[in-house]
Image (cartoon, rainbow, N blue to C red):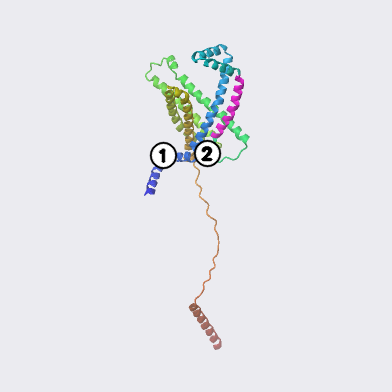
Amino acid sequence: MFDSIVTGVEQRIRARPWLDHLVRAAARYRRQRGDYYAAGITYFTVLSVFPLLMVAFAVAGVFLSSNPDLLLTLQDKIVEISPGSFGEQVTDLVDRAVASRGTVGVLGLLVGLYTGLGWMSNLRAALTEQWEQKTPARPLWRTKLSDLGALIGLGLAFVVSLGLSALASSALGPQVLAGLDLVHLPGAELLLTAGSILLGLVASWAVFAWIIARLPREPVTLASAAKAGALAAPVFEVFKIVASIYLQWVSSSPAGVAFGSIIGFMVFTYTTYRITLFATAWAATAVENEPDTELPAPAPAVIAPRVGVHDASWGVGAVLFGLGALVALGLSRLRRLR
């Protein structure tokens, strides 16, 4: 009875192509350890944040060193809001950071390059696993060079995405509407919100499609990646809204300010990678990407002649002997008559 119920459920799922595709994508994601890879990529992402902060401090040091008045104003504000001698200690740290901006920047770039290549290697391995590709062994230098090119390409994709988002916020901003005297237009705010969301979806779709199509070790179809990006982009935009609400909520308490942002960042990156890998599994299990079923070749034919020996019984032998004797006797009589 249980087998019949399972068979009925499978038949109903196969009768709905979208549901059948969803089930096959979830099975591929689970079978190819999607959550495991998402956790590993999250670790390398968090590890890459610190060298990026070092580079950011170095850039800030260069900017502050060329603006001594701004540096002095910053130090005065730190002393003003800090209790006791803590402000003076912070200002000393700022002076040291500005003085060692070159060393901090170079060290941050080197460490960032190392951690960035590790992050890209894990991300490409996770995407390749979802496609179930078999990549040939390559020299280490060639693999790292390919990862560096993919890292640069992904950076350019993010720049394009941020450019689209900035274009959306500037082209559809309240100042532009006020300049065009469209503020009092009925539905202007709704149009502004819808346009910003639409351009944000386009930017996210472009990044997801590029990641799914170009980051696996072996090339994949761009059409399937575009469809998967269209699936991942709305989910990601909704998740961004939820994440922004979470950050506003945790920022209302001292403990949330200290730990909420770090935990929120880890949860955000982990969930983003899960969305990316599931969308990749969705693209890999599309009908156009399913491999043709190969029928196994039949086993080779073996020709083996059979020779059987049957033992005759005594009765059969006696009958045959009698018949032979009668034939011989008849033949001898015919010869005599002649």
Pointer 2 residue = 129
Residue 195 on image: x %, y %: 43, 23
Mark nearest the camera among 2 and 1 is 2
Q: Would residue 97 be found to the left or right of residue 313 on screen?
A: right
From what the image shows, is residue 113 above or below residue 326? above
Q: Residue furthest front?
A: 84
Q: Would residue 238 be found to the left or right of residue 110 on screen?
A: left
How many callouts does the rendering have?
2
Q: Residues within 10 Å of mark 2 (few under 14, many from 20)?
A: many
Of residues 220 and 331, the one drawn nearer to the viewer in this rendering: 220
Residue 218 on image: x %, y %: 56, 37
| Residue span colored magenta | 100-122
Q: What residue is at 57 percent from the left and 12 percent from the top?
A: 68
Q: Are marks 2 and 1 in contact (CB under 8 Å)?
A: no
Q: Secondary structure at mark 1?
A: helix
Pointer 1 residue = 19
Question: Which amino acid type corresponds to the residue marked 2 in the rendered image?
Answer: Glu
**Residue at mark 2 to residue at mark 1: CA–CA distance:** 23 Å
- Residue 61 placement: quadrant: top right
Q: What residue is at 47 percent from the left and 39 percent from the top?
A: 30
Can residue 285 be seen here? The reply is no
Q: Secondary structure at mark 2?
A: helix
Where's the C terminus, which quadrant?
A: bottom right
Residue 107 on image: x %, y %: 60, 25
81 magenta-colored: no
